[in-house]
Image (spheres, helix red, strand yellow):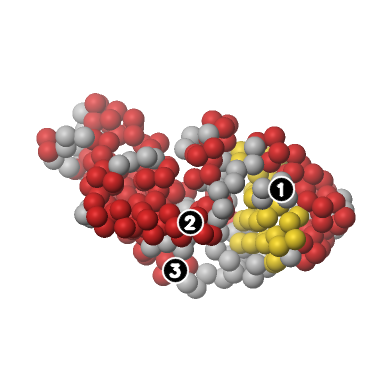
Amino acid sequence: MTDAGTDQVLPEHLVQVFGEHRNLLFSVAYRILGSAADAEDAVQDAWVKWSSADRSQVADPKAYLVRIVSNVAMDRLRSARSRRETYVGPWLPEPILTSADTAEDVAAADSVSMALLVVLETLSPLERAVFVLKEAFGFSYGEIADAVERSEASVRQAAHRAREHVQARRPRFHADRARQRDVTERFFAATTGGDINTLMQLLAPDVTLWTDGGGKVRQALRPVTGAERVAAWFAAIGSRSYEGVDPADMAVDLVDLNGGVGIVFSGAGRVIATLTLDLDDTGRVAAIHNVANPDKLRAVAARTIHHI
């Protein structure tokens, strides 16, 4: 492999070292940014820095690379925040296809769930990076301090603030995979059949639906709240075309999406939307995240499965 921007050929062992940690780097960046495309760019930036670094000064390649990608991701997040202020409608993270291994690891599945990524959007870039490195990857406070280039005391404070914030906004409950799949299948059947009664049984009274079209496809511009309103919204879907695709011509796949069971809608040769359900401790649907912005469906359309 050649060094970015030069004709220098890097030693094979340096390429191999980066390759060994590439999956980790993407995993860190995605959790900080909530965007697969931005995470890939952050990993590429890390590669450029790695390929041009004085590696004689690098005692721990893993720590060095995590530091690079964490800071690149925080910088990208600060830039993205300003763009998201003018976003049309609710902003949701970019969905990714995950592996069965991720789904079986409760901690890993929770750390990439749509529900948690939405909550992480409300943290500062530093708090988010610290939370991700501590809670998702188990780095020590000293290691995190080195990664984000802050004092250990400030990292501990940021971790405490982030943890309290997340716990206050998202009670930690993870439905088992069998229940997730059962509810998702029943929800889809009720939606396509226009069965409002079954939908009402599946939905929590205070359920909230977030739809992200980014102003590029028609979606609700504000969250839809309450079982009756959400049931009516979905019951109507089965009777009308969506972005020019008739319901009869739409393919539906149940897949591993962001660490849980999700739905991918396809038609006319493209991915149209994804849907994930977040269950409460009674097994009813407490939150629904519907991503239809075509710019955010590229990772799913590429069918790349991430082991994160």
Q: Is residue 182 left or right of residue 308?
A: right
Q: Is residue 234 in view? A: yes
Of residues 212 and 172, the one drawn nearer to the viewer in this rendering: 172
Mark 2 is surrounded, within 10 Å at the Cα level, by few (under 14), some (14 to 19) or many (20 or more) other residues, namely some
Per the image, label 1 sits on a secondary structure element best described as loop
In the displayed orientation, state which residue is furthest to the top.
13
Q: CA distance from mark 2 to mark 1?
A: 21 Å
Q: Percent position (x, y) of residue 70?
A: 32, 50
Q: Percent position (x, y) of residue 148?
A: 27, 52
Indicate which disc, 3 or 2, sits on the residue closer to the N terminus.
Answer: 3
Going by the numbered disc 2, the residue's amino acid type is Val
Which residue position is annotated with label 2?
166
Which residue position is annotated with label 3?
83
Of residues 73 and 115, the one drawn nearer to the viewer in this rendering: 115
Report the residue at 44% width, 68% height from top.
Answer: 83
Report the residue at 56% width, 44% height from top.
Answer: 258
Q: Percent position (x, y) of residue 137?
A: 39, 40
Numbered disc in front, either 3 or 2? 2
The quadrant the N terminus occupies is top left
Indicate which disc, 1 or 3, sits on the residue closer to the N terminus.
Answer: 3
Q: Quadrant of residue 163?
A: bottom left
Report the residue at 40% width, 36% height from top.
Answer: 23
The answer to the question of whether label 2 and label 1 lie on touching residues, with beta carbons closer than 8 A, is no
Numbered disc in front, either 1 or 3? 1
Which numbered tag is attached to residue 282? 1
In the displayed orientation, state which residue is furthest to the bottom.
86
Per the image, label 3 sits on a secondary structure element best described as helix
Indicate which disc, 2 or 1, sits on the residue closer to the N terminus.
Answer: 2
Q: Is residue 265 in view? A: no
